Image (cartoon, rainbow, N blue to C red):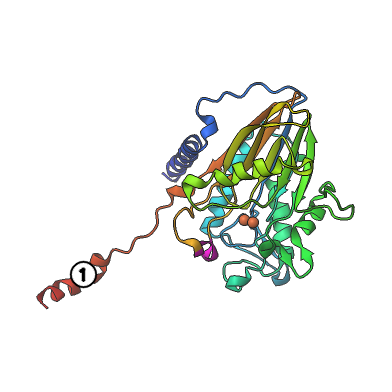
Amino acid sequence: MMKQNKKNLKKKVKKFFTERRVKNNARHYGVQYPRFSKGAISIVVISDLHCGSIKGACSSRPVLANKDSHWELTDEQKEVRKVLVWGAKNLRKRHIDVLIINGEGIDGENRHQHGNQSWTSDPLDMVNDVVKLLHELFEWEICYVSRGSKYHVQVGATDWDEVLAEKLGAIYNSPHSKTSISDDYGLLRINGLKILYAHHISYSPDPAGKGRPLSKELANCNDKAETRADFHIRSHVHSYGEYKAFFEDENNDPKMQAIITTPCCKYPDSFLFKGGMGHTVPDIGFVEIIVEEDGELFINPIVAKPESRDPHVSDVNKILGKRHEKRKKV
Ligand SMILES: [Fe+2]
Ligand SMILES: [Fe+2]
């Protein structure tokens, strides 16, 4: 009987995730990926892990070093982990060539809430847990880190995304500094394609206007050679977005440019509700990008919407019960 129940549960979980994947990943509607050549390079971009938040990503067993104990995962942490583990199993190329952590590996001290939604107050616990989680999820050749919002990653003079970069053995990639591993943005050249990754981009809470910051950023970056790129990667907004347009390259030839924003690995905390409840359900996951030998770009957003959560609704009539009957007479 127990065995049967377990089997049924396994089936249910599998069905649930498969449905979510097909339902939420627009790329899977009729888009056929080709057989990639040996020279194709795969990139995985993950960002906004917010490790340290009880609503963010975490390893299978987070360590509280100073307390000589381990943190027991919340339901939301378990849910985020399920999506990430499922995503890692569904990569087109299992062995990742380039991993980019595009800011906010950690949630930080959560000072607006005095850390009441953090599982540790020690940023080192958080950074160590990001490293552990990434090794649990992926295998990669080389990695890069960009720096997230200061509220999350900066304590005093220390940028903890830089500490994360050091712990991961990331490639030094600051556009102008020779002494730091990470920076606010970085540039890559992959199979002829110029890529600019940066954590920040402006944000529109209006769902119909979500594309505007992307088109604006792409056009603005095209103004100067330093910020011009064939493909831009941004994060920070906790949702997946994509925009493509033709611009003139340095030889005045039209060239397609593209920009994406990456999903996140965190449910909203109380601070994130400050702008209202609307559109606070995030996209959870990461993005796989494959650049073919000739520079052709394939984008595979691996995204799940946690809309399946069934929130508790307090049934007032049921609670009032007989008291309600009495009140009718009043
Ligand atoms: Fe974030
Ligand atoms: Fe951010």
Identity of the residue drawn at 51% across and 53% down: 205
Residue at the spot of label 1: 321
Residue at the outermost front position: 252
Quarter of the image holding residue 266?
Answer: bottom right
Task: For residue 207, say whether it is visible.
Answer: yes
* Mark 1 surroundings: few (<14), some (14-19) or many (≥20) residues within 10 A: few
Along the horizontal axis of the image, is 261 left or right of 141? left
Position of residue 184 measured from the top left corner of the image (x, y, whole percent): 75, 53
Q: Nearer the viewer, residue 329 or 289?
A: 289
| Residue 92 rendering spot, x and y as whole percentages | 64, 31
Q: Position of residue 307 (x, y in %)?
A: 44, 48
Quadrant position of ligand 1 = bottom right
Magenta part of the protein: which range?
A: 269-274
In the current view of this chain or complex, which residue is farthest to the left? 329
Residue at point 76%, 56% (across, down): 164
Q: Residue 58 occupies which quadrant of the picture?
A: bottom right
**Mark 1, secondary structure of its residue:** helix
Q: Residue 234: x percent and y percent?
A: 66, 46
